Amino acid sequence: MSTTTIYNFAPGPAVLPKEVLQQAAAEMLDWHGSGMSVMEMSHRGPEFTSIITTALADFRELLAVPDNYKVLFLQGGGLGENAIVPMNLMGRKPQPATADFVHTGSWTAKSIKEAQKYGKVNIAASGEATGYTTVPARDSWKLTPDAAYVHLCTNETIDGIEYQFTPDVAQETGGAPIVADMSSHILSRVIDVSKYGVIFGGAQKNIGPAGLTLVIVRDDLLGHALPCCPSAFNWTIVAENDSMYNTPPTYAIYIAGLVFQWIKRQGGVAALEQKNIAKAALLYDYLDSTDFYANRVEKSSRSRMNVPFFLKNESLNAEFLAQAKASGLLQLKGHKSVGGMRASIYNAMPIEGVQALISFMQAFASKHA
Ligand SMILES: *Cc1c(COP(=O)(O)O)cnc(C)c1O
């Protein structure tokens, strides 16, 4: 075994807290004396019931989810929700209904394309003119007076832009709910759930393994599913069955539950947010201090979770990645649609990982200066 400390900067599936992986390993063959692995248990038995009940309660506590919201554990991922959201919400208004989208980059592009199958789409604002380097200013949004909902991606994982404000759209839309895709920053910062109608996210960025999708939905938004909506993705049916309408992703829920307990031991979401602010500041300050590397995102829209950056001399990209890997700094390659590099620094990335990355970047820059 090498003694190099490994830091994994993957965008997702992504790094998990080591303590969580160690606990899962210790409990792999025999969960709490049950004689079974969590993977082998009935999802309706007393053991798994205690696992999912605790996970749900911890998640609600961590985000202070108000009582008039349901938390659902589903499958289908973030992209699945791109269809599941319109199938559940377009029916709020006479057909064909319109949903508003604030187009901020790669993920909203996919959400828009999918929603068009289930209703009309209005692009209320777009960051296209700036190359998706900024969240369009709130006062530029052209919302639909009677929209079924307003879709935002509050952290664009690929472009590295994040909302640093919580918008209010009620007045211009006649009370349309905000639907927020928080796949890549949920639990990284304190949010006011009551400002949103629906929050969804795939687990594999900041919560746990792929396969689990979380949905937080306000009670009054249930009961509007279009007839085409599959029952297993009809939020009303899933809520009535406590996320047990069909077999939920049991092992992913178990790991997510361990992550929720880890977050509580860290002092909760507010404490992690402070660490995330410090980690991001360290990396952006370094990027802004050098001419060797650059981040192109407008400062007010920079993501604390996903930091894309470019080498000024892109012919060094392959060498940068190979040497980073040899130094224990893994999965730094940028998304193919953007190029360059991307450091994803989710909750489970310690500040030491960011420091190690910066030290490596400094050494690489002085070697090639
Ligand atoms: C990763 C990601 C998705 C896609 O999730 P899948 O689980 O792969 O479907 C959607 N939205 C955002 C913002 C993401 O980061």
Image: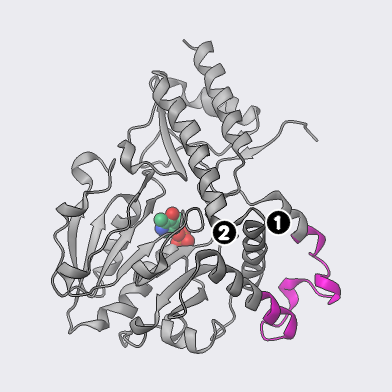
Pick the residue in front: 280 or 150.
280
Q: Is residue 42 magenta?
A: yes
Residue 75 % position (x, y): 51, 72
Q: Secondary structure at mark 2?
A: loop
Residue 177 vertical placement versus 113 (above, below): below
Residue stretch rendered in magenta on the structure: 24-51
Residue 312 vertical placement versus 189 (above, below): above
Residue 59, visible in the rendered structure: yes
Residue position marked by numbered label 2 in the rendering: 207
Dot 1 amino acid type: Val
Q: CA distance from mark 2 to mark 1?
A: 11 Å
Dot 2 amino acid type: Ile
Residue position marked by numbered label 1 in the rendering: 20
**Quadrant location of residue 192?**
bottom left
Write the residue at 57% across / 59% down. Answer: 207
Pick the residue in front: 342 or 142.
142
**Quadrant location of residue 349?**
top right
Image quadrant, ligand 1: bottom left
Q: Is residue 28 magenta?
A: yes
Q: Secondary structure at mark 1?
A: helix
Label 2 or label 1, whichever comes before in sequence order: 1
Question: As drawn, is 189 to the left or to the right of 148?
Answer: right
- Circles 2 and 1, Cβ within 8 Å, touching? The answer is no
